[in-house]
Image (tube, coloured by chain):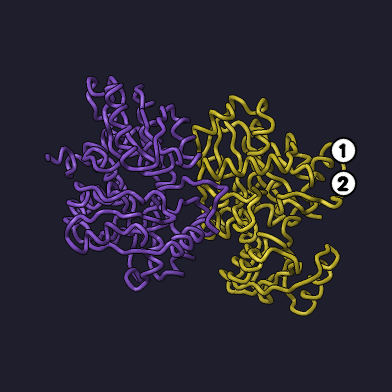
Chain colours: A purple, B yellow
Amino acid sequence: MSDNGANFAGIEAARARIRDLVHRTPVVTSSLLDTHTGAQLYFKCENLQKVGAFKARGASNAVFGLTSAQAKSGVATHSSGNHGAALAQAARQRGITAHVVMPANAPAVKKEAVAAYGGLIIECEPTLAAREQTLQRVVAATGAHVIHPYADARVIAGQGTLALEVLEQVPDLEVIVLPVGGGGLLAGVALAIKHLRPEVEVVAAEPEGADDAFRSFGLGELQPSVAPNTIADGLLAGLGAINFALIQRHVDTILTVSDAEIVQAMRLQWSRLKTVVEPSGAVSFAAVLAHPERFRGRRVVAVISGGNLDLDKLPW
Amino acid sequence: MSDNGANFAGIEAARARIRDLVHRTPVVTSSLLDTHTGAQLYFKCENLQKVGAFKARGASNAVFGLTSAQAKSGVATHSSGNHGAALAQAARQRGITAHVVMPANAPAVKKEAVAAYGGLIIECEPTLAAREQTLQRVVAATGAHVIHPYADARVIAGQGTLALEVLEQVPDLEVIVLPVGGGGLLAGVALAIKHLRPEVEVVAAEPEGADDAFRSFGLGELQPSVAPNTIADGLLAGLGAINFALIQRHVDTILTVSDAEIVQAMRLQWSRLKTVVEPSGAVSFAAVLAHPERFRGRRVVAVISGGNLDLDKLPW
């Protein structure tokens, strides 16, 4: 397949396209957490992004990159998480309909977000097969244009815009740490970083209970995700093929962390940065805490990928 | 008594003195909360201040305003909350000792904060009488200089520096809403606002269960605080006399809010702003939610005064 925008020019085009559609999120620091880790930490706060997650970048780039003919019947996706809300939000901004297929057991807070942005929710059984079949039926009935949560070059290019901001905000960074689930954020950011600053180390962080990227990277061949189980509900998706190809080329290392390490990192970020981080958003900092020797004395950007969670069900 | 710095010149001097000692905290907005309230809201994030609360301003101004002779035996206070941590932090920066008298039942998280900044904690019974007697004994034994949490002109001047920042960050504000407990923040900010921009409305927000400022303001005479009881544990203190005099002169209105309204406001700030706000810090936004007609269509600064709380004991 053509890479259709999953290259550096695509990321630059995405940045121009979404400049007025998404936030330039802040980078925050904490002298106490620096002392705690021995690193110089810069947290990139995508929990303060529109819809509370970096997903707004990719969804906005995809939706606003459609021709009028492509857009006229709306867009569609299946999502149990932030991509659904991001697609609904971008579609509303463009004035088109978003059809979001969601498993019946998706958290109420995620369904409410999609509905709040005007998305149409179509329920399905909580299996990947049911999600894909239901999406096909929606497309057949509506003619909507499908925008996949991560295995899509336009989405990858949109997520990659985060790297351009980070390089301006922390010009002397030495390492960047990002979570990996389906691989949209990681692929886009790694591509941009290595294009502009190949000496910067790109480290991915993945939950032990959903470690298909770690295994795939080690074996050099895409491995299936089998019964993933982690508190980081945003990272349950299996790695995409297009994403894996980019990750193989541009990522230096993948580290894994336990759920207990994720919860500890999340709690430290809440109490010290006073910022609300969802479990998936704390995985990058968890990797710094779990592998201190690798980061000590270095300037490290840790990406907080999102901040959406049910405040009634905190993991402590 | 002389006002000893609780005037506009004192606030300007405080700003110069503490410029490199405290953070210029950000102002954040949320289009969703604007839609929800009909107001244009600007949240001043003192939960991102050093020690997680505005108290760092007043404590730094007081500690760094001491002569070498005054400072040589350290500083002392009694506090069950953020002032103790702020004083310990400022004292450590100046290289002197802070003696902090704390009731034995103070939250563990507050004691840990004082200890983390190197403060010496002296325990006492949980009564105001015991706190004051214990403080007197500490002063007799050490010669430490007492810095009261709020009934102190240097502390009031330090808290007032927040107003100078806000006027730069939101130059066209029409209303500012602040919590009131002992009245240090309110007195300092109201004084500065009315000196520079008398047309800006200054609104105080107070918990119904600790409404001595509301009653004093209405009657025109300082009323005692009797058995205060509110979830906003940072606002339990009775209004200071020096504070009341400034509040009478410079504050336009005092509104009260229920604990249920405080919890609702806090939760909205957590979920929508992704920022960790303690109950006392949510009281200003609670007043906006409880009195929408007063704020609709106006540019309103709501001060988030702090973000320190026990994450194991959330009020929902």
Residue B101 placement, left or right of A248: right
Element carrying mark 1: helix
Towards the viewer: B101 or A100:
A100
Residue drawn where x is 55% and y is 50% of the image: A313
Residue A160 placement, left or right of B150: left
Question: Residue at label 2?
Answer: B223
Taking A129 as reference, is A29 above or below it? below
Question: Residue at label 1?
Answer: B219
Q: Would residue B9 be visible to someone looking at this image?
A: no
| Contact, mark 1 vs mark 2 (Cβ under 8 Å) | yes
Towards the viewer: B237 or A6:
A6
Number of numbered discs present?
2
Q: Position of residue B287 (x, y in %)?
A: 68, 36
Displayed quadrant of residue A106: top left
Displayed quadrant of residue A259: bottom left
Q: Which mark is residue A140?
A: none
Tell me the crowding category of disc 1: few under 14, some 14 to 19, or many 20 or more residues within 10 angstroms, Cα based: few
What is the three-letter code of the residue carrying label 1?
Leu
